[in-house]
Amino acid sequence: MSALIVSPLLLLSQVVKPNLLLMLDNSASMYDLAYIDESPEADYCFDTSYNDANSYEGYFEQSEYYRYKGTNGIFVPVATLPPSCTYRTDYVCLNITGTTVEDFIAKGNFLNWLSASKFDVQKKILTGGKYDTDKQLLIGESRGCVGRRFIKRIPAFQI
């Protein structure tokens, strides 16, 4: 056994059968949000913990910006945030008229924090994600906050 510890397996003269143990969690909790505020004083379904300095994995490219196309129900890449927004941070732009959101553009890192489930992150790592071949889209799988509604508030906004 000491030979295994000091020598890489490919340099050993004896044949060693490959052995891999892969354990996956497929419980219902994997559909819960991947990024939540876990501080003791936090409300489980109300989250304001986004920090642009942190990296959040998910289906969106972290450094890209995306515009929501409500008519199609999809996010499409855009070059940057527009210069003029009703509400703006370095990672989100909202244009609101009355009570209607006219335009929503956000950085991929923020969208991952907002929407990725634990299952989405696991699937992206192992297979690239759940893909709908007819629509040519990656499909997120989340049940929200333990099957209930959840609120994720942008920390810098006071709407």
Image: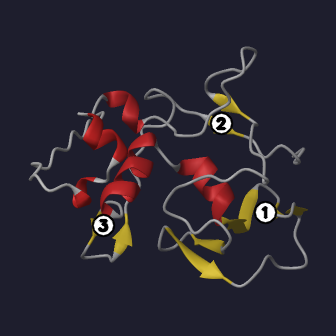
Image location of residue 113, percent across then percent down: 62, 49
The amino acid at mark 2 is Ile
Residue at mark 1: 91
Q: Please say if 11 is above or below 122.
A: below
Residue drawn at x 31%, y 53% is: 8
Image location of residue 73, percent across then percent down: 49, 67
Residue at mark 3: 131
Badge 2 marks a residue whose secondary structure is strand
Q: Which callout, 2 or 1, points at the residue further toward the start of the chain?
A: 1
Residue 4 appears in which quarter of the rendering?
top left
The way the protein has been coloured in the rendering is secondary structure
Q: Which callout, 3 or 1, points at the residue further toward the start of the chain?
A: 1
| Depth check, front residue: 26 or 133 | 26
Which of label 2 and label 1 is nearer to you? 1
Left or right: 113 with respect to 87?
left
Q: Please say if 123 is above or below 24.
A: below
Left or right: 78 with respect to 12?
right
Which of label 3 and label 2 is nearer to you? 3
**C-alpha span from label 3 to label 1:** 26 Å
The amino acid at mark 3 is Tyr
Badge 2: few (under 14), some or many (20 or more) residues near its Cα, within 10 Å?
some
Q: Please say if 30 is above or below 45.
A: below
- In the picture, the quarter occupied by the N terminus is top left
Residue 24 appears in the picture as rendered: no
The amino acid at mark 1 is Tyr
Residue drawn at x 59%, y 39% is: 35
Residue at mark 2: 151
Badge 3 marks a residue whose secondary structure is strand
